[in-house]
Image (cartoon, helix red, strand yellow):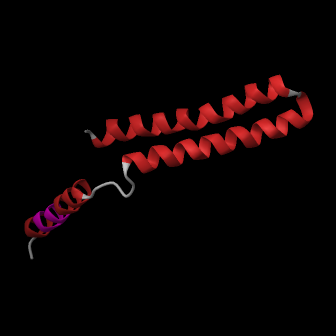
Amino acid sequence: MTRASRRKKKDKSLEEMAQEIKSQGPWLSWRTGLLTNGVISLILALFVGWQIYLAGGLGEALLWGGIAGVSIWVVFSLAYLANRFFRGG
């Protein structure tokens, strides 16, 4: 085999791999992902709030629990935006 034919074969396999990746669907439905994210953020908010409540009172518990719960959604949103930017669509 010449170098040119090997290069074409290699390029073709890379193109096929890229097409295969694009054709794959998501492993989790949108609704299930949002529900899972909501449950995880609620559990984290309650856990953090309970830990703070024992040490600092209700006001601080609500504040830090809310911050912990919202932080999950911030990370999710940034990951979603990065995915949309890099994969396009």
- Front residue of this view, candidates 35 and 5: 35
Q: Quadrant of the C terminus?
A: top left
Q: Position of residue 79 (x, y in %)?
A: 46, 39
Where residue 71 sits in the image (x, y, percent)? Answer: 61, 33
Give the residue drawn at x 39%, y 55%.
28
Q: Residue at the spot x=85%, y=33% of the render?
A: 53
Task: Choose top left, top right, bottom left or bottom right for residue 81.
Answer: top left
Quadrant including the N terminus:
bottom left
Can residue 65 be found in the magenta stretch? Answer: no
- 32 sits to left or right of 10: right
Residue at 77%, 35% (x, y): give it: 49
Which image quarter: residue 47? top right
Which sits in the foreground, 2 or 11?
A: 11
Query: Horizontally, is 63 left or right of 13 in the view?
Result: right
Whether the magenta-drawn stretch holds residue 12 is answered as yes
Q: Nearer the viewer, residue 52 or 74?
A: 52
**Residue drawn where x is 13% and y is 68% of the image:** 9
Looking at the picture, tell me which residue is in the foreground, 3 or 55: 55
| Residue lying farthest to the right in this orientation | 55
Determine the main secondary structure of the stretch shown in magenta.
Answer: helix
Q: Is residue 6 above or below residue 77?
A: below
Bounds of the magenta segment? 8-13
- Where is residue 36 shown, x and y percent of the image? 52, 49
Could you tell me residue 51's position as x and y percent? 83, 40
